[in-house]
Image (tube, helix red, strand yellow):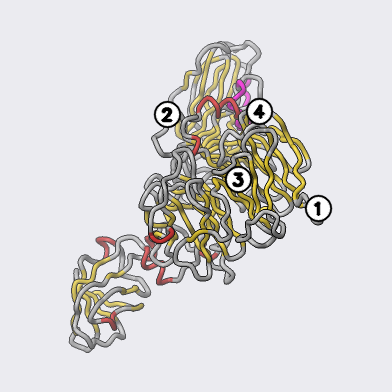
Amino acid sequence: MAANTQRTLPFPPWVPDLSPIGSASSVTITNVYPRKDGYGPFPSLQAFTQALPASCRGFFFARKTDGTIAIFAGTSTDLYQLNNTTFQWTRVSKGGISYSPLVATANWQFAQFNDLVIATQVNTAPQKFTLSSSSAFADLGGSPPQAAFVAIVGFFVVLTGLLSNPRRAQWSDLDAPESWTAGVGLSDFQDMSDGGNVVNVSGGDQYGVLFQEESIRSLVYAPGSPAIFQINRLSTQESLFGNNSIINIGNMVFYCGAAGFKMTTAAGAPVPIGKDRVDRYFFQNVDKSNLQLLVGASDPNFTRVYWAFKSIAGQAGLFDTVLLYDYVLDQWALLKVSGEWLGSLAKPGLTLENMDAIALGALQVTGTANNGSGAIRLALSATSNQYFNIAGQNFIEVQGVLGTTEANGSWAVTIIDAHHIDLIGSTYTNAYVSGGAIGGSLETIPFSFDSISNASVAQIAAMNSLGQLCFFTGPNLEASLETADGDPQASTVEINGARPITDSPAAFVSIGTRLAANAPIVYSAEYPIDDQSWAEAYVETRYARGHLRIPAGTAWTFATGIQPDVSIAGEA
């Protein structure tokens, strides 16, 4: 028999728009991120907050002058701020009154200018929240026009999607976000003579980008010029497909246009990044009637941008697919993640007391008493291991006790029985009135303490299907990767097993086969890898591709390809 070969077939770039035969591309690269040597695991969403009262229509974080973080979110009718202690959402709508509802295909837009957070939607005046003093939003001063979109360009606030004049872009005075009288200072506007309505604007330190219905223009500050901004056309007959698809990173602006995914700068015409790679896949799958769920976002920790969208088959009100693009490696991947909104957020800082309050499985205090030695004995609703493990903890956090208020605080404990604990070092003084709880075990907090030390660093985040703000810090998602179709030059081959090149301790291999290029792919059964990372797959075929599945929750770092054991069928 002829000698078998075991050449490694790499997992190639994900290019669903092309045939995997002869194109060195894959149609399945799911729930992973591109690496120069293959792919790595992508983590799942991990809840960080309580649920928003209604579906999220945009979120935003701002940095205060002391370095702390304030997080805001909008629903169709209200604005909310996250309480950084309880992780619940406080309504901060103007006057405590709901706004006129958002247009069904629109979302809230946010921007920070110094100490102000500015929020816009076309059915109300631009709103402001002063980070150092506000408890609720109020109208932005200077009588700016009602606008759908806001961005900061240099030291100007720029509004577009104006209710009064959709063809107009209007900006504040220089470094004066509440000065909007045209001709006073540098505040002014520009009506676009052609290209249609101005549908959005991307901000930046040096320049902005105006997106019109049929044109893209740069907006460059021209100090000393009576025109204030130099406006140059970057592209004609080019429209923005999704108003929330714009992503600004440095001097780069990524977006989804009617002709596909592109990147532009103020210096040149838009460059296609999705043509003959992911554009056809996207337009065949996106639900064009729900483009408010087409949302672009960046991850400041990596050279990646993301576009979430609702597919035609997706659940109403949720995106269910995310396209990941690494703009340094120039490679794409697919994430199957569901949620209401995608964006970049920083976590607020936490104290240990904060973490006790949000730990899972809080116990209710039902009474207090003198333990006979002068210390406080708490009666609890449940114990030790039923909801969380008290035993072995260095301390617990008691909060909300009325009457015996001296019980509130951090304590080491002695477990007395199934429903009672003593607080070591305490002194019983006041009779119990009501209330009280003990936060769950710190070990049950659903995110790593390591992430708290990086609280000031923004990360990719999402509002999940339950309305909880989440970060991608959970166990790894289930990964699926395929090689391109091997072409044996008209020969029929036998595959007698395969070895995935990965450090995953658990994985399953199957082989996709077809005898002709126009035949459908048929997959073999899945075979688990053994302790030698070998999968006992056997097929006879002409065209073959290897499929690797790594189960959810598996710890691994890389997957490079599959090494099949191949021989020409029938040779001896």
Residue flagged by tag 2: what amino acid is it? Ala
Secondary structure of residue under mark 1? loop
In magenta, the rendered stretch is 3-19
Secondary structure of residue under mark 4? loop
Residue flagged by tag 1: what amino acid is it? Ser
Dominant secondary-structure state across the stretch colored magenta:
loop
Give the distance between the C-alpha atoms of the residues marked 4 and 1, in whole angstroms: 39 Å
Magenta stretch: includes residue 212: no
Q: Which of the two labelled residues, at mark 2 and mark 4, occupies the earlier sequence position?
A: 4
Residue flagged by tag 3: what amino acid is it? Thr
Residue flagged by tag 4: what amino acid is it? Lys
Q: Position of residue 161 (x, y in %)?
A: 58, 43
The residue where tag 3 is placed is 160
Left/right of residue 265 with respect to residue 81 in the rendered view:
right
Q: Which residue is drawn at 43% across and 48% down?
A: 56
Left/right of residue 413 with respect to residue 99 in the rendered view:
left
The residue where tag 1 is placed is 225
Could you classify mark 2 by the number of other residues whose Cα lies within 10 Å: few (under 14), some (14-19), or many (20 or more)? Answer: few
Query: Height in image: 113 above or below 166?
Result: below
Q: Which of the two labelled residues, at mark 3 and mark 4, occupies the earlier sequence position?
A: 3
Give the distance between the C-alpha atoms of the residues marked 2 and 4, in whole angstroms: 24 Å
Can I make out residue 507 in this image?
Answer: no
Q: Residue at x 23, y 66 (%)?
A: 383
The residue where tag 2 is placed is 313
**Looking at the rendered structure, which numbered label has been put on residue 275?**
4
